Structures are given as C-alpha cells and as structure tokens.
Image (tube, grey):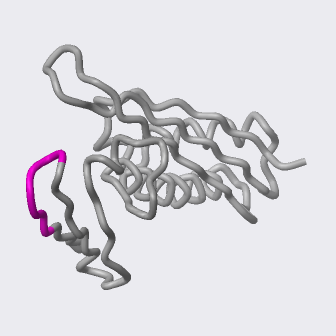
Amino acid sequence: MPTRTSRTAWNGGLEDGSGQVELSSSGVGTYTVSFPTRSADDANGATSPEELIAAAHSSCYAMQLSAFVAEAGGTPQSLEVTADVSLGPDSADGGFKLTGIKLKVVGEVDGLDEAGFQQAAEKAKSGCPVSKALTGVEITLDASLEG
C-alpha cells in the first residue's frame, strides 16, 4: 500500500505565526493554517488540523461503509458523511486535545433494511483505518437511511 505525504512550512510563534499545509502526494492544494484561526469559531479562509482530520475521517468512513454494506448484501447508491472534529483544553496534560468526533451518515442503499444498515454503519465506525488511528478520541455515530 502507498504512503501519502503532506508538508507544512511554519513561520513565527504559536500566537503570531502561520503556515502553509501542502497536500504533497496529490498536489491538489496548499492551505493556510494558524493558531488564531484554528481556535476561532470562524475559520476565515484557513484550514486546521481538525478540519483535515475531519476530511480524512469522513472519506475513509464512507469508503469503509460502502464495503461493509456490500459485504452485508446491499448496494450503496449514495452515502452523505460528515465528520465534526472538536478541539478543547487538555486538563490532564495541559494544552489542547481532540475532545470528540461526531460522524453522521445518511445513506441510500438497496437491499438492506434499517437494522442491516445500522450494523454496517457501526462496523465501519470501528473498522475504518482513520477510526482505528483515532482510538484515543470518543467517536459517536448518527446513521440513517433516506426515506
């Protein structure tokens, strides 16, 4: 299996610095990061490690769920997945930590009832590689079929 690479060039300190995150393997873009935008409610055009983790998690989960739906005898027509990754204070060690991830999926699936879809969705929550990498963070799931 391949290895993927990103690179960050950072200038300055935590509060006054900023950086550029480059998605090196794909070459699809370079994005601004800074702590003030990371910790603000409005991202103001910059990304953050949490948003990048959310993107990785939602896409990985969608792929894994499509595999488990097929394994259960269903045919996925569409899966709409969102991942909300929260950052908060780390009272144990100081600084900050990821405080939770909320996955939400709405699926259009042929050949599975709600119970079958829920089983596949839960299996994907623990089975996708990004979920496995994030075992130190509480991951919740809200899964439903369209219609």
In the rendered view, would you say 123 is above or below 47? Answer: above
Furthest residue in direction top, as rendered: 92
In the rendered view, would you say 19 is above or below 115? Answer: below
**138 horizontally vs 7: left or right:** right
Please count the marks in the image: 0
**115 horizontally vs 119: left or right:** right
Furthest residue in direction front, as rendered: 16
Furthest residue in direction left, as rendered: 12
**Residue 101 spot, x, y in % from top left:** 46, 36
Where, quadrant-wise, is the N terminus in this rendering? bottom left
Front residue of 70/19: it is 19
| Residue at the image point whose x is 10% and y is 63% from the top | 11
Front residue of 10/74: it is 10
**Residue 56 spot, x, y in % from top left:** 40, 57
**Residue 96 spot, x, y in % from top left:** 24, 30
Q: Can residue 1 be seen?
A: no
In the rendered view, would you say 137 is above or below 113? Answer: above
Q: Quadrant of residue 145?
A: top right
Q: Is residue 50 magenta?
A: no
Furthest residue in direction bottom, as rendered: 27
| Residue at the image point whose x is 55% and y is 41% from the top | 103
**Residue 49 spot, x, y in % from top left:** 31, 52
| Residue at the image point whose x is 52% and y is 30% from the top | 140
Front residue of 59/40: it is 40
**34 horizontally vs 67: left or right:** left
**110 horizontally vs 141: left or right:** right
Q: Is residue 11 magenta?
A: yes
Q: Can residue 43 be seen?
A: yes
| Residue at the image point whose x is 61% and y is 53% from the top | 81
The residue range painted magenta reads 9-15
